[in-house]
Image: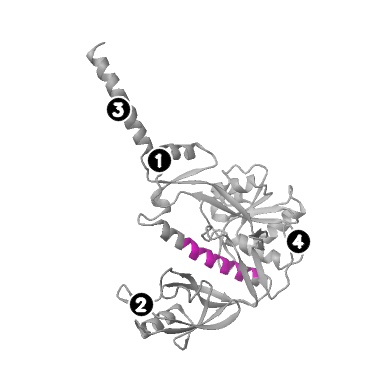
Amino acid sequence: MTQRTIAALVALPLVVALLVAAARAPLPYVTYEPGLTVDVLGETGGQEIVQVDGEQTYRDGGELRMTTVFVSRPKAEVNLFEVMADWISDEDAVYPYDAVYDRGTTNEESATRGAIDMVSSQDAATAVALTELGYDVEPAIEVLFVTEGTPADGRLEPRDLLLEAGGEPVERAQDVVDAVKAAGVGEPVEFTVRRGGERRTVQVEPEQVDGGPQIGIRLGTGYTFPFEVSVDIDDSIGGPSAGLMFSLAIYDTLTEGSLTGGGTVAGTGTIDVEGNVGPIGGIQQKIVGARDDGAGLFLVPQENCADALGAPNGDMRLARADTMHDAVEAIEAWVDDPEGAELPSCEEVA
């Protein structure tokens, strides 16, 4: 055996080890895979997901499925094998890390953002559904998130509507900030809130954070509704992308008969208080998840149409949803003629 052959045999295991190590090294990518779907007209933990207190409800069958995506978490170690598998698949996707997350984003920050977006999404969805049905809703300042371990923890809660702070009416978020600053550290601030339809008073004592008094809450726009509506979704599901489906489920719950005609409709899209449907991420993976769970119709935000047309949707029909009202009309048309109805098409805008 020559010296060269011996050297090659000795080096081969090292080369293989280096290749394996390189393949397993984390890469700056985020993977998207089809996630679960949830029937928002169904139940969770033995209770209906859409709950209404103070108004007649109707449970007449059919399914309205919100869709999700399994996304690798911030700072997750995604290796070459995972990236290549998802890149080759026509049901998964791979994106550059910076296109999805800020470099400094932690899992905790991502979860907090998702929780805040979910509260805002549900409130806007409720406002849109009730407005579509002719009810009056009024904007208000709302607690979107309470940071664990801060002065507000255990005293204020997400979805508390802030009516007064420090004895003064709350008309904008700055009114709350001003009341906390005026009290300073060590002096309690009295808040009057509306929680679960009831008016109550709580006191919170600010603490010093980053050079000023704070109580640990995030504020946003909520609404005063004529009766109580809540959407009970697992805390692990965050983000605003189910807004359209929440709105449709609330609308269906408050109207007699099944909006879906007893069939299964899935979809996605954010929603604003005007009822406009906005774009989301992972449209192709959401379509695959809905297809696999037996949906006959999938509602697509207009700005996601180009990507939706490339998804393997099988026999499931796609309908473009520009607004919540448009989505209702598309579902009704599909119910009347599942195969032949002329539905708003993604091809018209893609």
Callout 2: 10 Å neighbours few (<14), some, many (20+)?
many
10 Å neighbourhood of mark 3: few (<14), some, or many (≥20)? few
* Mark 2 to mark 1 CA distance (whole Å): 43 Å
Which residue is at 36% across, 32% downward?
A: 20
Q: In terms of sequence position, does the residue under pointer 3 or pointer 1 come before the other?
A: 3
Furthest residue in direction left, as rendered: 3
Q: Are marks 4 and 3 in contact (CB under 8 Å)?
A: no
Which quadrant would residue 177 be assigned to in this image?
Answer: bottom left
Asked whether residue 176 appears in the rendered view, the answer is: yes
Q: Residues within 10 Å of mark 4 (few under 14, many from 20)?
A: some
Disc marking residue 14: 3
Q: Find the distance from the CA under tag 1 to the CA under tag 4.
A: 47 Å
- Tell me which residue sits at (44%, 75%) in the image: 152
Label 1 Cα neighbours within 10 Å, binned few <14 / some 14-19 / many ≥20: some
| First to last magenta residue range | 113-129
Dot 4 lies on which element? Answer: loop
Report the Cα–Cα distance between label 3 and label 1: 20 Å
| Percent x, y of residue 14 | 30, 27
Q: Amino acid at mark 3?
A: Leu
Amino acid type for the residue under numbered disc 1: Asn
**Disc 4 target residue:** 60
Say if 323 sits above or below 318 in the image.
below
